[in-house]
Amino acid sequence: QVHLLESGGGLVQGGGSLNLSCKASGRAITSHTLGWYRQPPGKQRELVASVINGANVKYADSAKGRFTISRDNDENTVVLQMDSLKPEDTAVYYCNAFRLYQGQELTYWGQGTQVTVSS
């Protein structure tokens, strides 16, 4: 079992920056892919960015060049630095942990944090 606790988020003007942090606790955290998803109003949840280790990072096209994901395996945290924010980035952002273990997909979610970008 993995527990994810998010912090950060809030209201920011377009062009501004926000930093989301997620603290993971539980077993074998370093064996999990950690990432951030978001769910805009009335839309499906979508991947923003994920990281297995420093060399394996994935970004959604909408996040490339503006967002940076990083993880600290000593602290079991994953951070999403979001710059040049746009109104279309408004969404509930969810921290995610994923692991394939003995053929079973294990997925965990945080409670979500609201990000609102004003125009």
Image (tube, grey):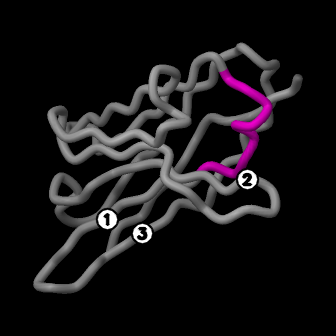
Occupied quadrant, residue 85: top right
Q: Residue at x 41, y 46 (%)?
A: 23
User: Of the residues under marks 2 and 1, which one precedes in the sequence?
Assistant: 2
The question of residue 33 being in magenta is answered with no
Secondary structure at numbered mark 3:
strand
Q: How many marks?
A: 3
Q: Which residue is mark 1?
A: 98
Secondary structure at numbered mark 1:
strand
| Callouts 2 and 1 close, C-beta under 8 Å | no
User: Of the residues under marks 3 and 2, which one precedes in the sequence?
Assistant: 2
- Residue 112: where, in percent of width, then height? 63, 55
Q: Residue at x 67, y 36 (%)?
A: 9
- Residue 83: where, in percent of width, then height? 58, 18
What's drawn in magenta, residue-wise? 85-93
Q: CA distance from mark 1 to mark 3?
A: 7 Å
- Residue 17: where, in percent of width, then height? 64, 18
Q: Badge 2 local density, few (<14 within 10 Å), some, or many (20+)? A: some
Relative to residue 49, is residue 56 drawn left or right? left
Q: Amino acid at mark 3?
A: Tyr
Q: CA distance from mark 3 to mark 2?
A: 20 Å
| Callouts 3 and 2 close, C-beta under 8 Å | no
Q: Residue at x 33, y 42 (%)?
A: 58
Q: Which residue is mark 3?
A: 108
The question of residue 89 being in magenta is answered with yes
Q: Quadrant of the C terminus?
A: top right
Relative to residue 77, is residue 63 drawn left or right? right
Q: Which residue is mark 2?
A: 40
Relative to residue 109, is residue 14 drawn left or right? right
